[in-house]
Amino acid sequence: KRTHKKTALRIKFGEIVRQRRKSLGYSQERLAFETGLHRTYIGSVERGERNVSLENISVLAIALKCLPGELIPSISDSD
């Protein structure tokens, strides 16, 4: 079984993704459809279990109607 290391930065990133998704009224399934990513991947991102690639940050940002930088927490937020 794969284990995913949660870090403060990953957890905060996931919280931001979840907040933006919910603000658009999207379910995880809808966000998965909009991004082409798997629903379980979206859930693991939101739980802070994934080290998300730059490519997937960009795909998520497009679907969440924001700039990629808006999904990335500041370093001080993740301490």
Image (cartoon, rainbow, N blue to C red):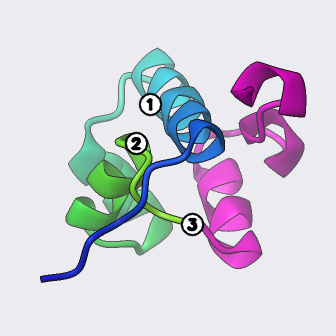
Q: Nearer the viewer, residue 8 or 42?
A: 8
Instruction: Identify the image quadrant of residue 56.
Output: bottom right
- Gap between marks 1 and 2, in whole Å? 6 Å
Where residue 73 sits: x, y (%)? 77, 32
Q: Which residue is mark 2?
A: 46
Helix, strand or loop for disc 2? helix
User: Which residue is located at x 46 percent, y 63 percent?
Assistant: 50
Instruction: Identify the image quadrant of residue 64.
Output: top right
Where residue 55 sits: x, y (%)? 71, 77
**Above-or-below relation of 52 to 69:** below
Query: Mark 3: which amino acid?
Result: Asn
The verdict on residue 67 being magenta is yes
Mark 3 nearby-residue class (10 Å; few <14, some 14–19, many ≥20): some
Q: Which mark is residue 18?
A: 1
N-terminal-most mark, 1 or 2? 1
Query: Mark 1: which amino acid?
Result: Arg
Query: Mark 2: which amino acid?
Result: Glu
Pair 3/1: label in front: 3
Pair 1/2: label in front: 2
Q: Magenta segment range?
A: 52-79
What is the chief secondary structure element of the magenta stretch? helix
**Above-or-below relation of 21 to 5:** above
Q: Which residue is mark 3?
A: 51
User: Which residue is located at x 21 percent, y 63 percent?
Assistant: 40
The verdict on residue 65 being magenta is yes
